[in-house]
Image: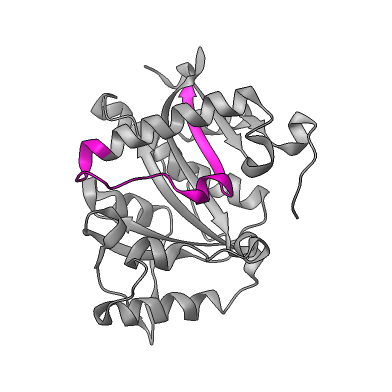
Amino acid sequence: MSAFDFQVIVIQDTYDIFDKSAEVQDVLSAVWAMKLKGYKNFFKYGVCPNDKYDFFSNHIIFTRKDDITKPLGGVKNITLGACQNLGIPFPPVMHMFGNEIKEKDYLHVYAINNWLSKFDPESIGYSMGYTMDPSLPKEFRRYLFDFVCYTFSPFYKENKIPNIIHGVNTLAKIDQKVEKIGFKDLMIDHLNMPLFKMEGLDDLDTRLMVSENYDIDVSALCGIEDFERIWSNRIVLSSETLGLKKLAA
């Protein structure tokens, strides 16, 4: 499979459009099935990539060009501002440390909340739920992950979200790839936060990483010209593009 064989789909306003668009239903249902398949391949029974945030998040989805209901991978993101408008918790702390914070995680939680307080809520994004179809060839999975890293730059700039936080696990050295494009360990008192065990991901070793003020540089990624071309031909499914009324601000 080459770069010419796949398509990027961006889904926004998911809660508003899911029940009104058969195309959105087909794509997201296939993505959720693919993500569950991917999680089952790596994690113990019961670890799930899907939750209520799927309906309030933006989705960046990679599919086969000849059939957009055959997803290759996907990632979702949500802003602190959106969560505040909806009256739901911003998910990083819950996703990383569970509903009941343990004493060993107090410093990490404090560091997250301290970082969040520095910026306007609408300017903070949280990236989560990255998954690829585990049946893809290893080399293509590497290529696809580089493309996922690339999308952090144009997507967040276009949506005016300059500050990003996420927990990046060390599985397959994902954290090192994210670090190469500019993400840094979250710091407090000039000290990097240590690795922690992410409760929601089967206690995987995880780094708490952030990017501030659009400080992402994807120019060194292999395949950058392909990525730019594919991104420019992305399909956007949203209230605006589908001519539907957006129910919430």
Report which quarter residue 109 is drawn in: bottom left
Q: Is residue 100 magenta?
A: no
On the image, the x and y values in percent for residue 51 come to: 45, 48
- Whole-percent x and y of residue 155? 59, 46
- In the picture provided, is 133 more to the left or to the right than 116? left
From the viewer's perspective, is residue 69 above or below residue 146? above
Residue at the extreme bottom: 189
Give the color scheme: rainbow, by chain, secondary structure or one colour.
one colour
- The magenta-colored residue range is 40-65
The answer to which of 157 and 79 lies nearer the viewer is 79
Question: On the rendered structure, is 57 left or right of 238?
Answer: left
The residue at the point 50 percent across, 33 percent down is 61
Q: Nearer the viewer, residue 158 or 248?
A: 248
Which residue is pictured at 52% across the width and 65% down the height? Answer: 90
Where 207 falls versus 223 (above or below)?
below
Quarter of the image holding residue 43?
top left
Whether residue 142 appears in this view of the structure is: no
Residue 220 percent coordinates (x, y): 42, 45
Is residue 126 visible to us here?
yes
Q: Nearer the viewer, residue 80 or 245?
A: 245
Position of the C terminus, as image quadrant, is: bottom right
Indicate left or right for 11 with 246 as reference.
left
**Where's the N terminus, which quadrant?**
top left
In terms of depth relative to the viewer, which is nearer, 165 or 179?
165
Is 66 situated above or below 196?
A: above
State left or right for residue 78 relative to residue 30. right
Residue 152 horizontal/vertical position (percent): 51, 48
The verdict on residue 52 being magenta is yes
Q: Which residue is pictured at 44% across the width and 22% down the height?
A: 3
